[in-house]
Image (cartoon, grey):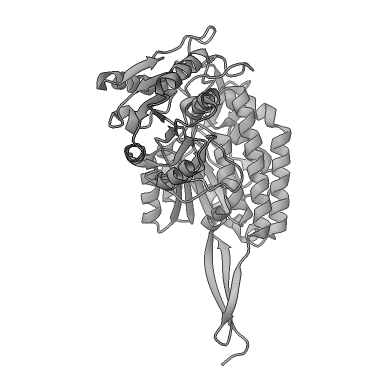
Amino acid sequence: MNQSTQYYYPIIDGVEYRQIKDWIDMREAASGELLAYLADSGKVEIDLAVDSAEKAFETWSKTSVEERSRLMFKLADMIEKNAEELSILEAKDTGRYITEMRNDFIFAVEQIRYFASVGLAFEDFGNTLNGGYMIGKRVPYGVVGQIIPWNDPSVMLIYKIAPALITGNTVVIKPDHNACLAVMEIVKMANTIFPKGVINIVPGTGEKAGSALTSNKKITKLAFTGSVPVGKLVGNAGISNIVSSILELGGKSPNIVFPDIENMDAVVEDATSAVLNCNGQSCLAGTRLFIHEDIYDQFIEKLINKFESLKIGDPLNEDTELSGMISNKQANRVMDMIALGKKEGAKLLTGGNRATIQGFSNGNFIEPTIFEVKNSMTIAQEEIFGPVLCVLKWSDYNQMVSDANDTKYGLASGMYTSNLENAMKLADDLQAGCVWINKYFNIAGGFPFGGFKESGIGRELCLDTLKEYTQLKGVSIVGKTI
C-alpha cells in the first residue's frame, strides 16, 4: 500500500481496527484519480463493532439526556468548524459540486442541533390507573445497525445517528463503499467526543459488511437508506430476527405546474433544481414534471434554455452548476435508460449525451436531459438516478392526479400554484410522504421525511423519529402492596 495515501480503517470501540487484509480503491468521481484506500471489512469487524456497541449501551442508555445533548452540540460545533474541508472531500468522493456540498453540511449541523434540542423535551407520559398510576415509558432499543447510501453520505449519516444517540441507543454504521470518506472523518471526530463504543463504523461492501450487520442477532433495530431491492433484503432480515426497520427507499416524484403561476422564470429555476440536485442522483428528485397545457409551450422553451445554459464541470469550481455521476457504472446505467427512452418513443427535447469536460477525460459527465413522455413509459416509472427529467402535459385535474400517483413509489412530490385551494386539495390527493408547495426540497428540522408505498417505512428528521428509536414500556404503580 502507498503510505502517502490516506487509508480508512473501521472504528470500533473508539479506535481504528487495523487488522485489515482487503482494501477498496477510493477514486475521485470526476477525475478517476486515487483518493484513498478504504477497508473492505466483513463479519469479523461487524461482530466486534456490535459487541463494542452492546457493551457501551449499558452506560450510554443510563447517561442523562442533558449529557447526551451536550455531546451532540459539541459534535455539531466540530463539524461546523471543519465544514469546508469536509465539503471538499465529499465533493471529490461523490462528484457533487462544491457549493451544493457546503449547503449539505450546513443542513447536517442544523439536524444535530435540532435533535440535541428536541430530545430534551421528549417525555414519557402518565395517567391515573385503578388504585394507582400508570407510566408510558420510552426506552432505547439498544444496538442500532445503520446503513447509509453514497449519494448524500454525510447528511444521511446525521439523519441516522442524531435521533439514535439522543434517545440512548448505540450505533454500528455501514457506509456505502462507493463514497463515504467524509463520513469516516466525521466518525473519527465523534469518537474524540463520545464514550468509546457509542459510535462504531465498519466500511465494506454490502455483500460482506452489510449482510453481516443485518444478520447479527444482537442488532435490535435497523435503519437503511438506499434502493428498493436492497431495502427489501434489509426489511426481510429484520423480520427474520424480529427486529423493526426504518427504510427510506426510492422515488419517482411528480412535480406539478398549474397555469396560475405568477413567476414562470422562478418556477423553471426551482423545477430544474428539483430534478438536478445531487446531479440527479437523489431519491427525492422531482423527476416527473407535469405542466399544464395552457402554459406548456412557453414553459418548455424556458426549461430547455435553462438546462442548456447550465455550466457542467469540475465539482471544485465555484461556478459549476452540474457535475458528474458517482462512477462509470452509474453513468452507463443512465445512458442505458436514455437509450431505452428513445426506443420507447419518448421525445428527446435536449441533452441525452455524455458531456466532455476538459481535464476530466475519466469523468462521468452527462448532459442535463429532458424527455417528453407518456406516464406508462419505463423512464417515467423507474428511477434513473441521473440528470434526466420526464415532462408531461396535463389539462384534466383528475387525470393528472391519477398519473401522478400511478407509480410504485410515494416518497416526495411538489407543485407550483398561486391558488391556496388548488394547493391544499392537491396536497391531500397526492400519495406521497412529502409534499412541497412552491419550493421543492424545502426541508428543515421537524419536517416529517419518509415515503408511502415502496418508498419506505418510518419517518426521519422530525419529533416522531425519536419514537422510531425507542420502545414503549408500560409501568403501573399501586401505592401499597395488596
- Residue ID at (72%, 46%): 73
- Visible in this render: residue 113? yes
Residue 25 visible in image = no
User: Where the N terminus falls, by quadrant?
Assistant: top right
Tell me where residue 448 appears, x and y as whole percent. 53, 48
Residue in front for this viewpoint, 476 or 265: 265
The residue lying toward the viewer, choosing from 386 and 253, is: 253
Q: Quadrant of residue 110?
A: top right
Q: From what the image shows, is residue 346 above or below residue 249?
A: above
Residue 233: % across, % down: 36, 45
Q: Is residue 468 left or right of residue 251?
A: right
Which quadrant holds residue 470?
A: bottom right
In this rendering, is residue 346 above or below 223?
A: above
Q: Residue at x 36, y 50 (%)?
A: 236
Q: Quadrant of the C terminus?
A: bottom right
Image point (58%, 24%), residue name = 91
